[in-house]
Amino acid sequence: MVTVVPASLNVCVALVGLLGLIGLAGLLRPMSVGWNTALFPLGAVCGVALAWNAAAQIGAPPQTLTLPIGLPDLPMHLRLDALARVFLLLLGATSSAVSIYYAGYFRREHGNGPGLLCLQYHLFLASMGLVLLADDAYAFMVGWECMALSSYFLVTAQHRVPEIRQAGFLYLLMAHVGAIAILLSFGVMQGGSWQFTFDAMRSAQLAPARAAAAFLLALLGFGGKAGLVPLHVWLPEAHPAAPSPVSALLSGVMLKTAVYGVLRVTFDLLGASVWWWGLVPLAVGLFSAVYGAVFAAVQTDMKRLLAYSSIENLGIVFSAFGLALVFRGVGMASLAALALVALLYHSLNHAFIKSLLFLGTGAVLHSTGERNLGRLGGLIHRMPWVAWLTLIGALAMAGLPPLNGFVSEWLLLQAFLFAHEVPRSFVNMLLPLGAAILALAAALAGYVMVKFFGVIFLGQPRETALERAHDAGAFERAGLAVLALACLALGLFPTHLVGLLRVVVQQFTGLALPPQTAPWWLLVPLPDRRASYSGLILLIAIAAVVIVTLLAVRHFYHRRVRRVPAWDCGFGGLNARMQDTAEGFGQPIRHVFGSFFAMQRELPSPFDRTPQYRVTVGDRIWRGLYLPLETLVQRAANAVARLQQGRIATYLLYSFITLVTLLALVL
Amino acid sequence: MTPIEVITQALELIAAVTVAPLFLGWINQCRAWLQNRSAPSLWLPYRGIRKLFHKDALLAENASGLFRIAPYVVFGAMVVAAAIIPSMGTRLPLTSAADAIALVGLLATARVFQSLAAMDIGTAFGSLGARREMMVGFLAEPALLMIIFVASLISATTALPAITENLATQALGLYPSLAFTGVAFTLVLLAENARIPIDNPATHLELTMIHEAMLLEYSARHLALMEWAAALKLFNYACIGFALFVPWGISTHASGPAALLASIPLLGIKLAGAGLGLALIETVSAKLRVFRAPEFLAVAFLFAVLGLLVHLLLGS
């Protein structure tokens, strides 16, 4: 039954299978830390091989494979094309760094044992691999559900904590609502042929209304997975609940499978090009970007802060997706290609940066046992490795040159800048405003990252226990360093990746960026626009000025330094509680964006002996949309519950009535 | 790289680094005249910097490496920014590495490092200053980007020399969109450079200050570099303004060495005018409460967006 199989896809399938086997091997000695510590680097090797295998022949023609397993009349179809390769590269590269880190992360703690974690973790990776390789709806949904379930068990690894159980339940619920939407979308796309291979969907001719329905359903399903507002509520609960390396994978890689899915459905399976489709993800994405950034700025839990920041970044990715759809719909091929390149670039960037930041918080969490920003501080002295490597991630996340976060934002802004050339009146005026919203989100990201890094690593330790904090171990440092290097490399040598992504976009959608004529160190996406950027030169220039200044100051003056107590305007009596707390640092945001939040303040009265000030910042969408929805479901369930009497006679009566009704209908 | 490119680049770099404190001194002098005070020396900023370089650096006991490296990074970013803004000529080799968006990013990098350094010691003032600076920053940055976008739309590129050249070589037509963005830019300039009405460069009153609060723990050479970087930032903003709104007289690709020579005094005149204007604004306006700053910057943003819409509606 095995058809002709070129090497690359075979290798990918073998590697994905191997990941699953490594997971099973964890069960051989489920309670042994040493055994499982040895297994994780093996998983990392698989990840590297997967990434290498994908990147080495990214432009190769698509390969297909039919596995002799699956449903009786629907064997599993697998396919490896340019888009799958780029996301396999993302999966392999990110997961290998996270796996190395995880090898050093095991501690004796309550919750699931290391063997179980090893199984769930590697199944999670393997199922994401299956999602990327699937070429029929059945294989895709199997992978998708395995991904949701294995990650559910990872999220609830510490299932003795009630909040974590709740977060896991919410996650599972949202994952399944999304999965239903995706399933329905596939159902619409098969177009009456009842063939569920992706090939059949590609060739199906859909009426415009059906195609639009399929698109919107897919957007709903994948948007829910990506955490777009208003389907984002699970994300800030579930991502922080998981162990930090898992949070890194959830934010860094799993959210990207949603991006992969929406690209696969829209550009490959539907293939239609209606320009106004793009407006929906564009608007939702931009709103999510600002919403996520604003909420990230007021968080007090460091992992929740990062989770909201993921909502922001996925919003940016989806706005790029919408922009690409609009451009393609009106026939502006090179700008559509530019937006898609920016989208893929940002996806890769976010995978590396967010994993780096989550792993950094994991090291802090292990060393201090604290997730609350209000009880951290000054860790740069105790954990210099973690602090400096995380700084690279924070600067990259803030979108600052010469790091990688800036490159993708730059590419996307370049695309937005020419959106006014879209030949649709009114829309062409609104589109450039998208650039303004994007710029606001990017600037807010800077605010968030200053808060994140400054409160955790700078200042004075806010608790005495922090004096005992220790730096991360060798495995953890290695994982962090790999990701930090990836951030640097993607920032300094963007032309190489853009060259790869250009091939991907061309092969996948037929849209082409104009040929690149600039030298390798200069990024010139559209030569006729004359805009260029080079992170490498910028870094060299800044470094040169810094070094010259340093040497000049030392040569002409002196290098004397005296250590003294902090001056603090001469007030004296400085203590750690005088610093800004996380709440304090978020105060301007609460002030400026007050209408975003459902805020409750408790102010102390002047006569209080122990005055307390409390402010809680809630999500309006949670209260306005989800709680009423929950009440509705609860009422419906109560109404249905009346049918359940617990008496067998009643149930027999129900069966009888049903039978009679059916007979009446049929006859 | 042709010789004239190297000369232009070097000239701009040296001019920015050396003239920036003078520009600050000039503004202070104008302000003193307008306020009927006897003016301090024009060279006072230089003397201050020189004095600071000679002093021993005092570092707080818990200052980290970030605190020590930040002044150099901020200074470096400002110098590189000065090198990519066309103030006298547009033949700048470095501009191929950074366009207008990257320039905004470079300024943001400096801001983030300055804020992080301010939080490093862990004093109340430092984190207060950092928080306010980031607040002004996240409001001003989109406005600045929109201003640059309008200019980019007119010239269909984000490359700064191309924008400036395009604006400088056209017949002296007035762009209505640029009039709006000009107002927006002035507001952003005031906010970003810690001038009245957002911040008061002359005060150390803790309730009102932003920029000074971040520098409180710095001393000696670190403080000198921070002050110098602040002067450079003001100079850079002035030059961005010239490049976008009064680019006339700048030496372009078509012109010879004589034009470059002529652009030197012209830049001096522009700077003198800008300094006088700034001093006038600072004299006639009062400091806003910190929480009025968002409204101030929202107005700037709105003007920039209006400029954009005007450009798209009128096509000019």
Image (cartoon, coloured by chain):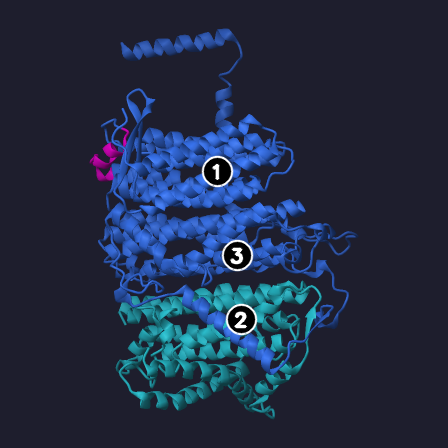
Q: Are marks 3 and 2 in contact (CB under 8 Å)?
A: no
Give a yes or no on whether discs 3 and 1 share a subunit.
Answer: yes
Q: For the N terminus of chain B, which image quadrant? A: bottom left
The chain carrying label 1 is: A
Q: Nearer the viewer, residue A390 or A7?
A: A7
Q: Is residue A233 visible?
A: no
Q: Is residue A478 left or right of residue A263?
A: right
Whether residue A395 is in magenta: the answer is: no
Q: Nearer the viewer, residue B144 or A468?
A: A468
Mark 2 is surrounded, within 10 Å at the Cα level, by few (under 14), some (14 to 19) or many (20 or more) other residues, namely many
Q: Position of residue A139 (x, y in %)?
A: 35, 30
Q: Which residues are magenta?
A: A196-209
Location of mark 3 (residue): A394
> Which residue is the extreme one toward the right?
A609
Q: Nearer the viewer, residue A535 or A592?
A: A535
Q: Which dot marks residue B74?
A: 2
Q: Is residue B130 above or below residue A328?
A: below
